[in-house]
Amino acid sequence: MKAIRRFTVRPVLPEPLMPLAELARNLRWSWHTETRELFQSVDPEGWQAAGGDPVRLLGAVPAARLSELAADRRFLRRLAVAAADLDDYVHGGRWYQTHENGGALPAAIAYFSPEFGITAALPQYSGGLGILAGDHLKAASDLGVPVIGVGLLYRHGYFRQSLSRDGWQQEHYPVLDPHELPLSLLRQEDGAPARVTLSLPGGRSLHAHIWQARVGRVPLLLLDSDVEDNDPGAREVTDRLYGGGSDHRLLQEMLLGIGGVRAVRAYCRVTGHPDPEVFHTNEGHAGFLGLERIRELEGERGLGFDAAVEAVRAGTVFTTHTPVPAGIDRFERSLVARHFGEGGELAGVPVERILELGAESYPGGDPGVFNMAVMGLRLAQRANGVSTLHGAVSRGMFAGLWPGFDAADVPIVSVTNGVHAPTWVAPEVMRLGARQIGAGRTEDALAVGGSTRWDAVAQIADQDVWDVRRSLREQLVQEVRDRLRASWKQRGAADAELGWVDTVLDPDVLTIGFARRVPSYKRLTLMLRDPERLRALLLDPDRPVQIVVAGKAHPADDGGKRLVQELVRFSDDPRVRHRIVFLPDYGMAMAQKLYPGCDVWLNNPLRPLEACGTSGMKAALNGCLNLSVLDGWWDEWFEPDFGWAIPTADGLGTDEDRRDDLEAAALYELIENRVAPRFYDRAGRTGLPDRWIEMVRRTLVSLGPKVLAGRMVREYVERLYAPAALSHRALTADAARDLAWWKGRIRAAWPRVAVEHVEAVAATPVGGTAELGATLTLRVRVALDALAPEDVEVQAVAGRVDAQDVIKDGRAFPLKPAAGPDLEGRWVYEGPLALDRTGPFGYTVRVLPTHPLLATPAELGLVAGPADTDPAGGVLLR
């Protein structure tokens, strides 16, 4: 008989054990080894059955066991220590509270993301974006950064993956009960659940409750539309992560952005938390948060639309994670207009102005769509990519928003991603490092990531390094066998035909890992390009290789599913199935065993389509060496001392088959002739692979401090959050109105701004041979129309030129007004230009708007150059 309603009955903890409830409700346990070990000691078998989830564990512990623990003085001492440590961690001063520029730092930052990967016990993530967001919150907590996370609570999470008998991916969507998760409802002062409401077309409403998760010091607010007051369609808005059609996705993103701002306001009102000064949009999915803040400013501070936009921009940071336009959410303009038009959301905000913010109003853009990333960039004064290479790719991809500027001048900077070491480093590696780094709280040792402490890892003995690496490989072998057996049973196999699983993998064989989402550009099956050559590598009698593969294709991506099936069918072959395995249902729990247990982490995307690729960072922190295409973070930090770069065939254009053939051959060559020989070389007197161990050591010493999420969050604070907070404070209502008026005046006059004449005064005539160290005096006549010199900056840009006379690595030099204006509004500017580089050299002159409240001269996307030259506007000196 099926129950008509399900709910959870929780045990009543004895008074001495009450601190267990607080420890279970704060997700710090997910990265704090001592707390996890405390819960495991409550009931070791129950801990395993609960999947390492303290909330589930406490819901199943027998009352007799709880009574026993309540009288166990040793356990109570451990409990008291853990509770006191959490209290100190949550309330004590940390890096942020002792920052030398504390007065400039924001009182609070709201961080919006469509997914958060905190722990497997809270499955609200699909891949790298969510894991990055979770690591961002954890590192912010470790550093004491006052972040408020904002997302959605998906009742089915992302899908669970299994395989059919013939290897086809199958999706399952288990129902998640928030009451069984480490969450609590945000409640008003009267005890009623706090909620937010959005208006929908046709007089409908979308209500959402606000669930809280505690991520150390950081609150994470998750909006849930499964509310009884909603109609059936509205209740399903937060059903699945990245599910449904365009209308469904638009409603999810409206709830995340607009509802998220309202949830933050409710949280701050109820708890007394400071209101955010900075809003961080992690990808375009949350971009509608800017519209809600515009509505607030128009209604509460009486600002007009343009002034409200300026005030919103000042305190907003936008991070883009995609290197391809196809990765951006784009909606039909008519759909957006319907939801924000009459009877829809944001009443009083002109719908045409909303549509302008997401318009692809640049060459090659589609006038019929509303682009979420474009809106995110237009409503953020500061933007960044997630690696140095990705920043460059993003500047090129979005250059149409800044017409007239070289891609290098597009105002998108880079903050390279990092990973949260306490989450991803195996306890065995942590203990090994602690002997050299020293005792102390893990979060403190790794959050700051000082190179001095990491240098101490170089002193760890070779035998200790090798013993830990083999132990982790052995644990992975057992994990793989357990998961493989369970997978084959799901596929319909009987125990009697699974004896071979006990021989899968070998703890003494070189182990390569490959695990990630399965879009085509990540090339899951590149390793299968030459199946016979791969088999030879796997079965080499002297230097065998074994490979562990995992990954999920999007439910709607049949192409990705075919790649999974191709890999599964190869790994099912009895000739090689003991050397290569595919593990379904890749997630955080699997990853925490996979990264430490592999010797080499493989990454072979189509360059430059990997924005960052943080899985290799997690592997590196465990002493796993990277074998990767020079893309994302690996392009930035690769050195031969600690890994290998797979050569790429970047010049082949659209011939993807040829490119894959060449790069697969390069991959086989590296494994066969460099990676495997290095691993199996035991010629030294110790019988250990000395050169391999040295690469492991160099990985930890050189990459360790760089790949930390603590380093990443510190960069966000100092390079983006602090400047955004200062801009937010400067944009008072009057300042916002003045800035909006000034921008309008500049845009109106700009078509008549031009550099009319440039001349250089020097002993050596322009166009001749100039000597290093010489100085030119530039004299420039500029038409400013009705603008004044304080409205603009006139610059000379000089540097080496290439064969097409394009200035490379140019530097800008300001010129000063020397005379003017004449009757037609012309001014004369002058300034010196030092010839400080040899070789082909050139310069040009440009005019840019300038204002104290601009973050960059490119902010308006306006630039004027010489009227009588080509767009490069250059003069050459050879």
Image (cartoon, rainbow, N blue to C red):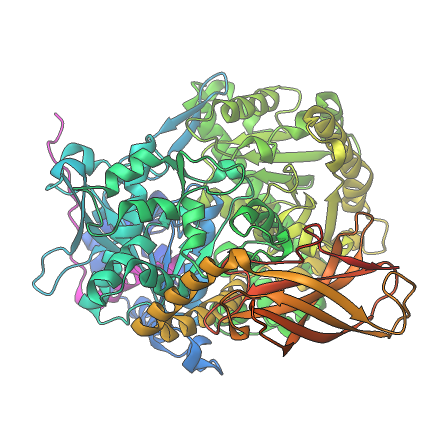
The answer to whether residue 474 of the structure is visible from this angle is yes
Residue segment shown in magenta = 1-30
Asked whether 447 or 390 is in front, the reply is 390
Q: Which residue, as the protein is rendered here, is positioned at the far left?
A: 190
Q: In this view of the protein, which residue sits in the foreground, 462 or 802? A: 802
| Quarter of the image with the N terminus in it | top left
Question: Compared with residue 724, is residue 319 higher up or lower down, i.e. above or below?
Answer: above
Q: Position of residue 469 (x, y in %)?
A: 64, 51
Hey, which quadrant is residue 513 in on the image?
top right
Q: Residue at x 53, y 35 (%)?
A: 550
Q: Position of residue 197 (x, y in %)?
A: 17, 49
435 left or right of 261?
Answer: right
Residue 144 seen in the current view:
no
268 or 16: which is nearer to us? 268
- Hey, which quadrant is residue 31 in on the image? bottom left
Look at the image and say whether residue 735 sits in the magenta stretch. no
Give the quarter of the image for residue 734. bottom left
Quarter holding the C terminus?
Answer: bottom right
Residue at image position (29%, 33%) is 247
> Is residue 29 in the magenta section?
yes
Q: Position of residue 272 (x, y in %)?
A: 22, 72
Note whether 496 is above or below 9 in the view shown: above
Q: Residue most toward the top? A: 166
Q: Position of residue 161 (x, y in %)?
A: 42, 30
Of 256 and 617, nearer the camera is 256
Q: Which residue sits at x=86%, y=75%?
A: 773
Number of labels in the image equals 0
